[in-house]
Amino acid sequence: MLVYLAKRLASLAATLVIASLVIFAVMEVLPGDPAEIMLGTNARPDTLAALRADFGLDRPAPERYAAWVAGFVQGDLGRSYTYSVPVGELVAQRLWVSLPLAAISLLLTVLIAVPVGALAATRRNGPADVGIMAATQVGIAVPNFWFAMLLVFVFAVSLRLLPAGGFPGWGAGLWPAGRSLILPAVALALPQASILARVMRSSLIDALGEDYVRTARAKGLSRSEVVRRHALRNALIPVLTIMGLQFSFLLAGTIIIENVFFLPGLGRLVFQAITQRDLIVVKSIVMLLVASVVIVNFLVEVAYAAVDPRLRRRA
Amino acid sequence: MAMFSVEGLDLSIYGLPILKGVSLSVGEGEILGLVGESGSGKSMTALAAMQLMPRGASATGRILLDGEDLLSKSEVQMCALRGRDIGMIFQEPMTALNPLKTIGAQVAECFAQHLGARRAECMAWAGQALERVGLPPSRFPLDRYPHELSGGQRQRVVIAMAVALKPKLIIADEPTTALDVTTQAQILELMRELVAEEGTSLLIITHDLAVVAEMADRVTVMRYGEVVEEGTTAAFFSGMRHPYSKALLEASTHVPARRKLTAPPILPREGEVAPHSGDGGGDAAAVEGTAPSPDPTRLAPRGASHPPLKGRDQPYPSPSRGEEGPGTPILVAQSVVREYRGRRRSLFSAPEKRRAVDAVSLAVRPGESVGLVGESGCGKSTLARTLMALEPPQGGAVLFRGRSLAGFSAADLTAMRRAVQVVFQDPYGSFDPRHKAGRLVAEPLHLLRGEIDAAERNRRIAAVLRDVGLKPEDADKYPHEFSGGQRQRLAIARALITRPSLIILDEPVSALDVSIRAQVLDLLADLQAEHGLAYLFISHDLTVVRAITDRVLVMRAGRIVEEGPTAEVFAAPRHAYTRELLAAAPDLSRALAARAMRPAWESPAAGEVPSGG
């Protein structure tokens, strides 16, 4: 178990190092000098040079990389070129919108997908299964922003139950802030839940065809007992894999969804930062996103070991 | 009165009849052997008794357990009954247990399910149940997972679950087919003991007549969903009446007639039409007989027949005793060592090395048939991979026609692979299901590097298909359209197409029914005689190795413990392990002899008159 975890941790660290190198290198080769963009094309060369020196852009690349990584590790993400505030503060504010949004979506995804997929698998080829398969097909085909608009139309415009967009901030209270995240989270979760439900269904169907299911039935377990006690846990292993991958889709999805719902989250921040060539912000957010995806996948692998004893060998 | 009986059971799946009027009975404390080949409906009979039939199945008739009709029970009643009154043991111990649950929890589940006892109590009982099947918790803690146990140990866990609640009937469906011979002997012994102790009735389903002869009091033979013969074991073996039973017996003790080569083998040169492919006239006539024949002695007519032998008048009297085959050896292993990196004990220690093959030497000469026997995990297949130059040895050398593979160029390797082909155990698994048979069979032709044109390629495909008893038209079929035996014929055809001088056969008949196995063995013997092929025959099945090889090597834990002419090794094994293997292998004549020695009272049904089929 320890060896397994140590290996996973080592691969996590290696991934982060490689990702930071790639992100830094890409930002280096990308055209567009932030100083030029801030000061405009008519800026005097000495002003440009001064601003570059202020940003530290005149130092050699390895040195800047080292400074960036060192700062990143200490929580100092540098200063935004455009907002002129520390990137750390900027990101922290936005993180409190995006992280809950992604977490709620992931939770919704699992809460929808596992029971729905299990239902379809146990009623294989029955009306429930056919209906679920059709619905998930639509869920996969339709993009999440369209769901977003549909949800806004139904729940905000017609029923007036939930806000159509905007975010009052957590200072306004848990419910006012939380309810403005509900529609975006649902819009993000629906396509992912559709995918995961299908994975759950086929994985459970496979598990139900295994010999140990027949053994359990021969012991006197009913069909539903076999599903609950034996097949479900075995079926979860592929589901976990897909969940880990989906987390990065959810993060990428926030960029669109936050723009649709006018949420001041990381997604909108990175979108604005890219258009404004605020490279230090882009770099930091992308690195943060990479780190969170890698960490989530690490957690998935820890979960594998928790589910599957074959991975946690006795030392 | 019979403890368990099936009366006039008809079963169909989506309207397709599977069982036709099956009747059988098992007395109290009696062991009934249910014999038949795959597809004969023996497993379906068992599943019908458990009411665990596949989708779309409907059954009529009566299945009585202790006087109660199981077919009329509801699912809820059956759940209460399964595991309590009927225990079931399955064929595949490797997959019969839930990999995510401890063995203790899985055995305890039986008690929890039927007695509703508390967890701690169930676990204590589970410990006792495992102790009874030879897995004492002191050595096999209850928190072990299935993957930490061997196949035989897992089968013991399955047996512990089946006997946990002292059921009235145990159904064992091919309980030892997937196990090594020594493990098989232990498991059979265990089942016999448990049944004798509790007076439980046992229905043992098997295709192996030797197992029946060792275990059963009475025998029921099934074919095509019908019972064709039944009787006491002694009466059954002494006076088989149904031709199918006789054919089955013949097939399980089948020794292919092998012809000695009259001349040193001459391989057909490239570009020539091989002499054996001929005009196909005689062969084509032979393969006409593939349609189901009304002859009741014909086994499994869905399989293909093989071409008749033209030279059977020169039987191969006895394997060449000690004398060496002609020419230099095709393949030689010199003290070959194969090591694997084991797992690390801790984060910082070097991984331990595991020696899978330990200083093994062997030689295969042209036209010779060499057997390599040993139990699973002894390193046979690892050795085979090294011999095929798929993995390099860590010590020693493999020589192909006198030259070490270590110095081979890519062109040398191509030449070697043309001459050394391979056939694996699972023919289906080694075929791409989306390719047609012709393309699959022609696969190794890439080794000829474009030396032959498309017409010659097609000629060769047709020729090898005829060689293995299939039709040239079969080239347009997909693998799933062939039966298991036919797929193995395809695999052999694929090996033949480069006109090799040696074929390495890795358990080529282990997955086949006895009658199909006999046909494939005949085919191999014929091909050897016709083409002067050498075989390296890797198997755990001593009967098969005995039937088809001249020399045999016995392998254990990576080492060759004994080698010599097959007949000598089998007649007078020198090494203790060989003797152990031979003693463990179910042997029909020995079992029958032992049965004759047993006093009559041991067999409760011995006095009954067999009712015949």
Image (tube, rainbow, N blue to C red):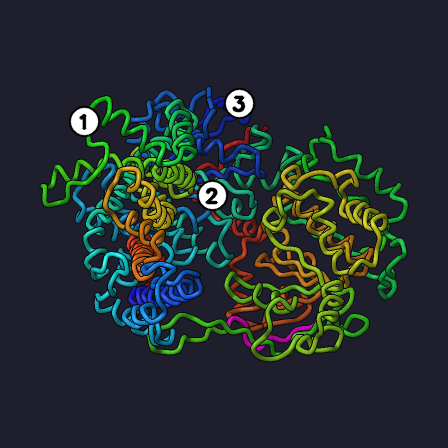
Tell me the subunit letter for badge 3.
Answer: B
Using residue B316 as the reference point, say whether residue B3 is left or right of it. Answer: left
Q: Nearer the viewer, residue A261 or B327?
A: A261
Q: Which residue is drawn at the image coordinates 51% and 61% (left, top)? A: B376
Which residue was labeled with disc 1? A161
Residue range in magenta is: B356-363
Of the two numbered discs 2 and 1 in the rendering, the one whose residue sits closer to the viewer: 1
Crowding around mark 1 (Cα neighbors within 10 Å: few <14, some 14 to 19, many 20+) is few
Give the answer, above or below, for where B406 lies relative to B80. below
Is B81 located above or below residue B12 in the figure? Answer: below
What residue sits right under mark 2 in the picture? B600
Residue type of the residue flagged with mark 2 = Ala
Tally of numbered discs = 3
Place of residue A106 in the rendered image (x, y in percent of width and height, measured from the top left)? 28, 43
Is A230 positioned to the left or the right of B249 in the image?
A: left
Q: Secondary structure at mark 2?
A: helix
B361 magenta-colored? yes
Please identify the quadrant where the C terminus of chain B is shown: top right
Which circle's residue, 2 or 3, is located before the other in the chain? 3
Task: Check if mark 2's residue and mark 1's residue have beta carbons within 8 Å.
Answer: no
> Split into 4 quadrants, where in the image is the N terminus of chain B?
top left
Question: As drawn, is B182 to the left or to the right of B346?
Answer: right
* Residue B158 visible at all: no
Task: Check disc 1 and give the amino acid type.
Answer: Leu
| Chain letter of disc 1 in the image | A
**Residue carrying label 3:** B21
Q: Main secondary structure of the magenta part?
A: strand
Instruction: Say left or right for B482 vs B395.
Output: right
Say which residue appears at 37% left-offset and 76% top-offset.
Answer: A60
